[in-house]
Image (tube, helix red, strand yellow):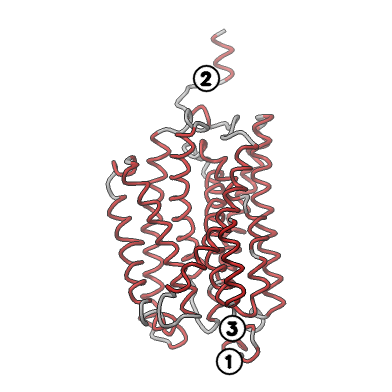
């Protein structure tokens, strides 16, 4: 954190605009993990899942980093006029005029407050009732979390879509895409599942989850990761194919710009590294339980997600190719934001029970049969 913060300040002195883009890249990377974690918590309650019980608590802590993400978004708020070309009146054009009702400075800042407010409401509410369930074991806690999830899945879909449009897609406001929110969603959950797999390994070996995490948690996390590998590829290809097939200038320019210089190479890396390699690796059932395969693949997933986000963000300021000369500033922003969030996550994890203590599905997860109360009384 110290090294990253120091280098970020040097970057601010050298080129504030470049710092803004590097910070935005790192922020969107870690925001994807927070939002992906929120989705997994919501998914757990919507489907009354059993196998996700042991990992639910630390995923809740990941999702609850959202309030701190608001603090880490402050540099973007300050540097926004340098980051987003549409905020400069000199760049006003017909496309911006047509979208002015939505894409204007006051509305953009107002939506930031609304989006973070909804995320904080959902994440804090879900964890609050989860911790209360540990204390009382009351059925009301389970019902409350299900209600949060029922409303939250719709709020999640809308807010994530708006965040992706406002903070990444609007970097080139002339571009049209109806699939961009789903695209960011698929990539976010994909990266989050890789992160969850690593944390499962670490927390099982370190001790907190040693007795509750079993082969099923690793296997099912891998299966879900495989599913989102295919889903991400489907969404990404569909967006490209529809734009290529329609051949409309207000859509195709986005991809044409990303065929210039080394961006073409990054695009090929994403095709083969983000989809084909994970797809072929996760295709085998036994690979999902092989840590020698899965842990390097998780690290590879983080690298691919970085390349994917860079492919979306950096061509705006570096149309000729990947800005290798600024990789130190990207790394500095990653180190500062990642270090801060890791510290906050560890603090939250240590302050609460490492896994749900009285979840009604916990016995089933541990493969322990608990007879119904009426049956127990009859036996006595």
Q: Quadrant of residue 304?
A: bottom left
Q: Are marks 2 and 3 in contact (CB under 8 Å)?
A: no
Judge by depth and name the residue closer to the eye, 242 or 287: 287
* Residue shown at 41% from the left, 60% from the top: 303
Report, in whole angstroms, how far the alpha carbon at label 2 lies from the one at label 3: 64 Å
Residue 226, percent from left and from top:
36, 52
Label 2: element kind: loop
Q: Is residue 379 above or below residue 330?
A: above
* Residue shown at 64% from the left, 86% from the top: 88
Residue named by callout 3: 85
Residue named by callout 2: 371
Judge by depth and name the residue closer to the eye, 154 or 129: 129
* Residue shown at 59% from the left, 58% from the top: 156
Q: Which mark is residue 94?
A: 1
Report, in whole angstroms, how far the alpha carbon at label 1 lies from the one at label 2: 68 Å
Comes first in the chain, label 2 or label 3: 3
Q: Nearer the viewer, mark 1 or mark 3?
A: 3
* Residue shown at 48% from the left, 43% from the top: 199
Q: Residues within 10 Å of mark 3 (few under 14, many from 20)?
A: some
Comes first in the chain, label 1 or label 2: 1
Q: Is residue 72 above or below residue 56?
A: below
Residue 41, percent from left and from top:
56, 47
Q: Are marks 1 and 2 in contact (CB under 8 Å)?
A: no
Residue 162, percent from left and from top:
59, 68
The quadrant in which the N terminus is found is: bottom right
Taking the image as shown, residue 135 lies to the left or right of residue 17, namely right
The quadrant in which the C terminus is found is: top right
């Amino acid at each position: 954190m110290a090294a990253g913060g120091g280098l970020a300040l040097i970057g601010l002195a050298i080129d504030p605009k470049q710092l803004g883009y590097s910070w935005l890249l790192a922020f969107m990377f870690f925001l994807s993990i927070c939002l992906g974690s929120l989705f997994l918590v919501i998914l757990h309650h919507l489907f009354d899942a059993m196998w996700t019980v042991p990992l639910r608590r630390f995923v809740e802590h990941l999702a609850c980093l959202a309030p701190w993400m608001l603090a880490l978004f402050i540099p973007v708020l300050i540097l926004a006029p340098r980051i987003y070309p549409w905020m400069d009146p000199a760049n006003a054009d017909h496309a911006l005029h047509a979208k002015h009702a939505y894409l204007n400075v006051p509305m953009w800042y107002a939506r930031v407050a609304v989006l973070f407010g909804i995320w904080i409401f959902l994440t804090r509410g879900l964890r609050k009732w989860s911790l209360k369930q540990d204390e009382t074991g009351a059925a009301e806690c389970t019902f409350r979390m299900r209600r949060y999830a029922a409303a939250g899945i719709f709020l999640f879909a809308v807010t994530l879509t708006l965040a992706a449009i406002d903070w990444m897609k609007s970097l080139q406001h002339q571009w049209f895409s109806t699939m961009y929110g789903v695209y960011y969603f698929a990539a976010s959950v994909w990266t989050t599942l890789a992160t969850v797999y690593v944390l499962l390994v670490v927390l099982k070996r370190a001790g907190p989850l040693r007795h509750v995490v079993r082969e099923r948690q690793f296997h099912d996390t891998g299966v879900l990761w495989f599913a989102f590998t295919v889903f991400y590829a489907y969404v990404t290809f569909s967006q490209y194919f529809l734009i290529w097939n329609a051949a409309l200038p207000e859509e195709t320019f986005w991809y044409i710009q990303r065929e210039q210089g080394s961006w073409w190479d990054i695009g090929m890396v994403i095709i083969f590294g983000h989809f084909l390699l994970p797809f072929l690796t996760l295709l085998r059932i036994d690979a999902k339980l092989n840590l020698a395969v899965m842990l390097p693949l998780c690290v590879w997933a983080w690298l691919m997600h970085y390349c994917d986000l860079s492919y979306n963000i950096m061509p705006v300021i570096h149309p000729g190719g990947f800005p290798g000369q600024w990789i130190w500033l990207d790394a500095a922003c990653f180190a500062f934001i990642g270090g801060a969030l890791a510290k906050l996550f560890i603090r939250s994890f240590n302050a609460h029970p490492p896994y749900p203590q009285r979840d009604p599905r916990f016995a089933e997860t541990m493969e322990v049969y608990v007879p119904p109360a009426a049956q127990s009384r009859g036996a006595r």
